[in-house]
């Protein structure tokens, strides 16, 4: 049985695969750009808006990059028999929603979606190992 645990945030995903008692870990980078919006127009009135920027194009670009990240991640875990998803912010919840809408066969294998703090690689391995040991 191939158990896969994923810890992900906006920057990267750590994928821990446990099969026949052997653990493997790989990292998938998100390649989501962080945008610092420049420019805009000021105003001559005191207390008025200082920067007026149309940020919809930045948000749209980020949305497409996030979709590509989730697709790459789903492809990396599609051979799992059971899947556990962990993360510190809201990215892991968005990934679960993406599985529900676009990867239904993988969504059926999800055993848990849980919020956890940022962790080191070894802490992620221990978290995944403990989760699947306690589940069996």
Image: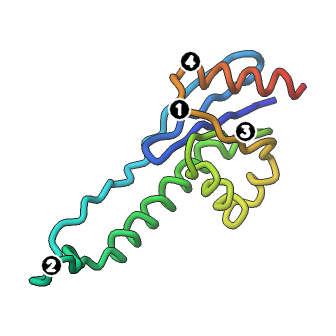
- Left or right side of 69 for 76: right
Kindly report the distance in space between the C-alpha atoms of the residues bearing marks 4 and 1: 12 Å
- Residue 111: give x, y in percent of width and height: 81, 42
To which quarter of the image does residue 16 belong?
Answer: top right
Q: Earlier in the sequence, mark 3 or mark 2?
A: 2
Residue indicated by mark 4: 122
**Comparing labels 4 and 1, the label whose residue is closer to the camera:** 1
Q: Secondary structure at mark 1?
A: loop
**Comparing labels 3 and 2, the label whose residue is closer to the camera:** 2
Q: Secondary structure at mark 2?
A: loop
Q: Please identify the residue farthest to the left as the structure is shown.
A: 44
Q: Earlier in the sequence, mark 3 or mark 1?
A: 3
Identify the image quadrant of the C terminus: top right
Kindly report the distance in space between the C-alpha atoms of the residues bearing marks 3 and 4: 16 Å
Residue indicated by mark 1: 118
Kindly report the distance in space between the C-alpha atoms of the residues bearing marks 4 and 2: 53 Å
Residue drawn at x 21%, y 80% as measured from the top left? 48
Q: Secondary structure at mark 4?
A: helix
Q: Nearer the viewer, residue 101 or 46?
A: 46
- Residue 41: give x, y in percent of width and height: 15, 79
Q: Which mark is residue 84?
A: 3
Kindly report the distance in space between the C-alpha atoms of the residues bearing marks 3 and 2: 52 Å
* Neighbourhood count class around disc 4 (C-alpha, 10 Å): few under 14, some 14–19, many 20 upward: few
Residue drawn at x 37%, y 68% as measured from the top left? 61
């Amino acid at each position: 049985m191939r158990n896969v645990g994923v810890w992900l945030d906006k920057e990267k995903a750590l994928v821990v695969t446990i099969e026949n008692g052997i653990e493997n870990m790989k990292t998938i980078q998100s390649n989501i750009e962080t945008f610092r919006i420049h420019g805009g127009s000021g105003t001559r009135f005191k207390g008025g808006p200082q920067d007026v920027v149309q940020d919809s194009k930045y948000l749209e670009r980020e949305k497409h990059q996030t979709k590509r990240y989730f697709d790459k991640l789903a492809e990396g875990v599609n051979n799992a028999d059971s899947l556990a998803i962990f993360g510190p912010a809201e990215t892991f919840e968005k990934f679960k929603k993406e599985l529900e809408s676009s990867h239904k066969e993988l969504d059926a294998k999800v055993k848990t979606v849980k919020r956890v703090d940022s962790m080191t690689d070894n802490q992620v391995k221990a978290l995944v190992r403990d989760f699947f040991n306690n589940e069996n």
